[in-house]
Image: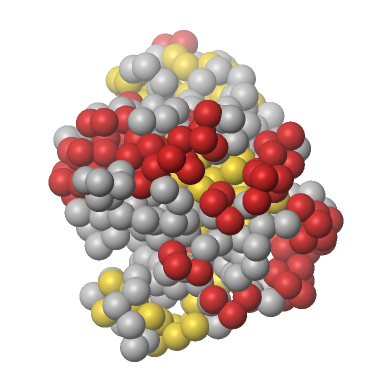
């Protein structure tokens, strides 16, 4: 829909409050007005909804490997389109296509494919690339292939970023491996988010990096990290004491719900970002699947490397993560919007146009019904997903 249209009446979850029995008017892909029915513009196309429905800001998944049988590391246009359209079904309007540790030429081929497809996907939009690996610590490799892990290098990164047409927006980095903090410094100076992850950094090492403001984010916090110990608090404690954003996989497998509550109570609503870290098995049946060239067994939604107890991604989607956080912590919809959209938009420099439902921002939103199911997803004013259960009026 390119013309002016409006949707309502429904609850609209804005930055600081919820508007009841409200309509949103959309023009040129932007939100241009909130109003009641009697204030609607004349001769405007109206999509009527049930008043019990809720409009939430389009979710941003900054850490997503795959879904519905497709994986970013396939390096194929069809796979990226599958991921894009599948994410829209779960209320995601923006994502970072996330790579894994692999042979250098394979990563180059993959990031080039992402850059070429960036503006041509049919569902959720690609905001850039999250480079997860190869600059990680083999001690905390998790499900990453240790065969291709390398030391952080400005030259190596620059080669990859050129192949990516400079679309790498976030880099997972084992900062303790980065001698002289050269790569972290280079990334920061070039406006690329430095995310500490797959790291065995000590408390002191992490505090030193934080003191230089070289870290902005923590990749899947708690997972792929030196554990907390009462005599060596490690990077997790240092990060909770900082101003960094912390990614959380709220599937109940990666972090115990009560640990998530402890983290939330410690850092608050402005520093937590929900991610899926999902792999290609998401939305599919149990079985054996490929993840970055390694075999993963999926049973009852739990993903582990074959022959190992190492967790290997998830089968989570962000709407399920949102519902889990609502059930576990009793969070409000305004707070959940921060965890699923606002905080990531701020981290990635997208907040001027995305991350909340406000006047003159992109019309990026999703609508849930009384059962918290996504029934409609809109990206820049265009409907990219409509559920067959979407009822357009009371």
Left/right placement of residue 53 relative to residue 243 reads: left
The quadrant holding residue 345 is top right
Q: Nearer the viewer, residue 163 or 71?
A: 163
Q: Nearer the viewer, residue 380 or 213?
A: 213
Residue 37 percent across, percent down from the top left: 40, 17
Question: Does residue 224 appear anywhere in the picture?
Answer: yes
The quarter of the image holding the N terminus is top right
Residue 41 percent across, percent down from the top left: 55, 16
Residue 102 percent across, percent down from the top left: 63, 74
Left/right placement of residue 68 relative to residue 3 reads: left
Which residue is at a point 34% across and 74% down the rendered structure image? 310
Rendered position, 315 above or below 2: below
The quadrant holding residue 148 is bottom right
Left/right placement of residue 254 relative to residue 47 reads: left
Residue situated furthest front in the rendering: 231
Which residue is at a point 47% across and 59% down the rendered structure image? 198
Which residue is at a point 53% across and 77% down the rendered structure image? 145
Q: Nearer the viewer, residue 45 or 1?
A: 1
Which residue is at a point 59% across and 36% down the rendered structure image? 214
Question: Does residue 339 appear anywhere in the picture?
Answer: no
């Amino acid at each position: 829909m390119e013309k002016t249209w409006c949707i309502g009446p429904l609850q609209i979850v804005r930055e600081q409050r919820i508007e009841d029995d409200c309509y949103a008017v959309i023009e040129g892909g932007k939100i241009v007005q909130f109003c009641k029915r009697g204030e609607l513009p004349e001769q405007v196309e109206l999509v009527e909804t049930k008043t019990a429905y809720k409009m939430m800001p389009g979710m941003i998944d900054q850490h997503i490997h795959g879904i519905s049988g497709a994986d970013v590391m396939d390096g194929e246009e069809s796979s990226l389109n599958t991921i894009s359209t599948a994410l829209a079904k779960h209320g995601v309007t923006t994502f970072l296509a996330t790579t894994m540790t692999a042979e250098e030429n394979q990563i180059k081929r993959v990031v080039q494919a992402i850059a070429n497809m960036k503006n041509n996907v049919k569902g959720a939009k690609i905001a850039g690339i999250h480079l997860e690996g190869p600059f990680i610590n083999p001690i905390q490799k998790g499900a990453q292939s240790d065969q291709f892990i390398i030391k952080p290098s400005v030259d190596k990164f620059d080669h990859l970023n050129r192949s990516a047409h400079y679309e790498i927006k976030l880099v997972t980095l084992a900062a303790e491996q980065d001698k002289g903090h050269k790569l972290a410094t280079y990334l920061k100076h070039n406006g690329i988010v430095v995310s500490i992850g797959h790291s065995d950094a000590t408390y002191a090492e992490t505090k030193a990096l934080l003191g230089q403001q070289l870290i902005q984010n923590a990749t899947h916090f708690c997972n792929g990290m030196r554990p907390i110990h009462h005599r060596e608090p490690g990077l997790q404690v240092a990060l909770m004491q900082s101003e960094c954003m912390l990614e959380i996989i709220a599937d109940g497998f990666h972090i115990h719900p009560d640990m998530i509550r402890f983290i939330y109570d410690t850092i608050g609503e402005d520093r937590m970002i929900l991610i899926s870290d999902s792999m290609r098995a998401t939305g599919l049946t149990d079985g054996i699947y490929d993840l970055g060239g390694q075999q993963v067994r999926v049973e009852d939604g739990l993903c582990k490397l074959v022959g190992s107890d190492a967790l290997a991604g998830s089968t989570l989607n962000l709407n399920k993560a949102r519902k889990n956080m609502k059930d576990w912590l009793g969070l409000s919809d305004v707070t959940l919007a921060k965890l699923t959209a606002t905080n990531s938009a701020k981290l990635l420099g997208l907040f001027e146009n995305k991350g909340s439902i406000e006047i003159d921002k992109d019309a990026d939103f999703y609508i849930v019904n009384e059962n918290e199911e996504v029934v409609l997803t809109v990206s820049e004013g265009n409907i990219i997903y409509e559920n067959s259960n979407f009822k357009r009026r009371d």
